[in-house]
Image (spheres, rainbow, N blue to C red):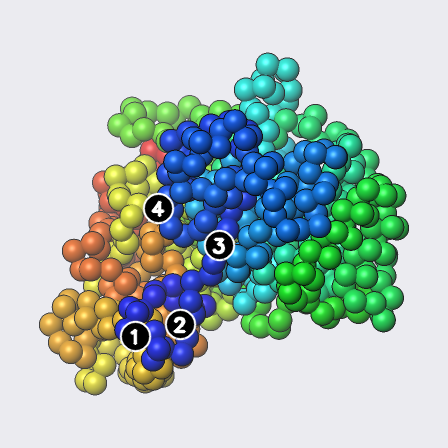
Amino acid sequence: MSLKIKPTNEETSQDSNYTEPKRIWVIIAVLTPPDSSMVKFCQDTRWRVIIIGDDVYRFLWGKTRCIFHGRRDQRGLNFDSVKYIGTIENLPPRKNVAFLYAISQGADIICDMDKADVNVLQNIDLDRKWYMLLKNISVFNPLDHFAYTSSNYKSFTYEIVEDVALTIQTVMPYVNYEKSLENNVTFQFFDHEAPPIVVSSGTLLQFVPISRIYHKTSFWSAVSFSKSSSVDAMCHSQWQQRLIWEIGGTYIVHPSQHQGYPQNELKDKPLAPDCSQYLISWTCPQNLRLTNCMEELSKDVKTFTNISLDVLLSWIKDLHHLNYVVPSRSNIGSGASRYTIAESSRVQLTYSPKVLHSQTLMDKKRDFLESICEDSSIYTAKSDRYKRRVVDDVLLLVVFNLPFYKYVQWIHNMYSLKYSTMAYCGDSKELFLTATEHLNYSLTFIEEDVSAGFYIYQCVSAAIKIGYNVSGILMLSDDVLLNTWKTDELPKDRPWLHQVYTLHRDQSHNWYNWRQPWGQKAFKSVWQELTDLSKNSTAVKNSFGNFERRLQVISKSETGLCFGFEDIVYLPQRIFNEFVFFGDLFAKHKVFLEIALATLLVGLVENEELVMLPGSYLWDNDRTNYERFFNVSHIFMHPFKLGVESKKLAGLEFLCHTYIPYL
């Protein structure tokens, strides 16, 4: 994963990894005068904006930084596609002309955006290299991934893939929530924290995106057609997806920031299964070029009219006139038989969408208490001191040092009262699924080699790569007892950790782990690679320089590093990218977690930004007398073995009467 740090202009010629910023164009159809949000959007220097608008507002749009495309403007352009403006449905031919204009201006990325989605565009990383690849499904409605579900058992299998060749990115479509309420429509809410997904050859998405982001290799597919029904729209959407298979491309879906979908909006969308099945089985003759495949498939799909074919032919003619290079086919024959994501070390995961519970928070808590405590009426004034507020924008990541998953239910029932976005990580997905198959709900599980807990920070890296839309990730080992009622007091934009001690990479130390292969030797190895990388990349040099400087400040030494017991840490979103870069290198060289996590968190922010967590680490006989050390004002206690203590009367007494009443 490349660092998103740009060198100065003077340094770019010496940086072999630096690339010029992509030229981004945005096309928006707006039939009203500009409002303040659009004026601001047009002023953003990251892109140029084409407004497809009504000529009566030309003067007002002319005062903005947008490029205004009225009918008169577009009819004056030298494109064959211009002849369809005013002869068929208004918007599709005008979009085609706007696209052709952007291509003529040297665009690298063209965003066909609905006005309501412009804020989403500002939050999408157009250079993102890590995605969740959907597996083993030929037709998939992305609503099943992005919306809250009423089914506790829904889950999907993904792989985390690296260096995805970005082709088309889309945003989940939205509808008017208030209008749905007026019509007494059952509403299906979006999970705004859900990570984006990618599909490749062999999978068709059953939806019609309103906003699409086209990368240069996909410009040929951006042609718009008139649509007489939602079935037409679905087939046209899947026509585009199927042709993307021919170049080994990808189709990416990002979460919407809108509230959701009314369920009746989807009723006629499953009416197109024949279109899906036909497209999956369709093959383009091997001797044809991609543009010929476009023509052939347009003739074969019944929803395409003669005028649609004429529009397509004009579009292809205009692309040729602009010297746009249409990609060569790389998936000859049935794209369904080809796997197009480049091979890499892939992380497997089972992803479960959030469940929209009908129970209130207290009902949920009561059910949990009744299932484990003899006296379920133990609500006391203890819990009244703390507000019960569910946190949506933090991913709670529970990591298992060993694949003992029997008591996941306890952990989930306790912590999901506070954190709605949760995931689990450890060895062996099969063992996890077996241990949780009796539950009446599905859970998200990331399969990672944690090597008995030595490298649990790889789980954090994997969770970042998944791409949850969250403010941060709170990681804790499964044997940490978390006082969830205290975490609201902590800032979400700063890292949290428990303790920091210092070492020197060139000096011996009597700490056991420093003397092992995963200690000093491993740290020197990763440090050498970082030194070597910084010689060839200005971005790495700058980031590594800051990393080293911060370690020097806290250790008061040029060779300093950190270690500490870090069974619970929090990473704010702003350090995600650098954590993956440095963390993956630390994991590559097998650096022990107590060295890696402390050094990473200290090295990625200024020392004064670190938040030190109050908590209890218990050793020797203290572990059997944990109730003496439990402090409701602390953030955590470690270790607390649920699997052991839940079988003891004293353990249940502590849980039911001391700990749970605060949840």
Residue lying at 58% horizontally and 33% vertically, measured from the top left: 174
**The residue under label 1 is which amino acid type?**
Glu
- Earlier in the chain: of badge 3 and badge 4, it is 3
Residue sticking out furthest to the front: 76
Which amino acid type corresponds to the residue marked 3 in the rendered image? Ile
Looking at marks 3 and 2 on the same chain, the residue that comes earlier in the sequence is marked by 2
Residue 482 - label: 4
The residue under the point 43% across, 30% down is: 60
The dot on residue 11 is 1
State the separation of the CA atoms marked 3 and 2.
18 Å
Tags 1 and 2 in contact by the CB under 8 Å rule?
Answer: yes
**Direction from residue 289 to residue 497 in the image, left or right:** left
Q: Which residue is mark 3?
A: 24
Select label 4 or label 1 by which is in front: 1
Tell me the SS state at disc 3. Answer: strand
Q: Is residue 57 visible?
A: yes
At 75% from the left edge and 55% from the top edge, which residue is drawn? Answer: 242
Residue that label 2 marks: 18
Q: Is residue 162 left or right of residue 92?
A: left
Front residue of this view, candidates 369 and 295: 295
Q: Residue at x 73, y 61 (%)?
A: 245
Q: Report helix, strand or loop for mark 2.
A: loop
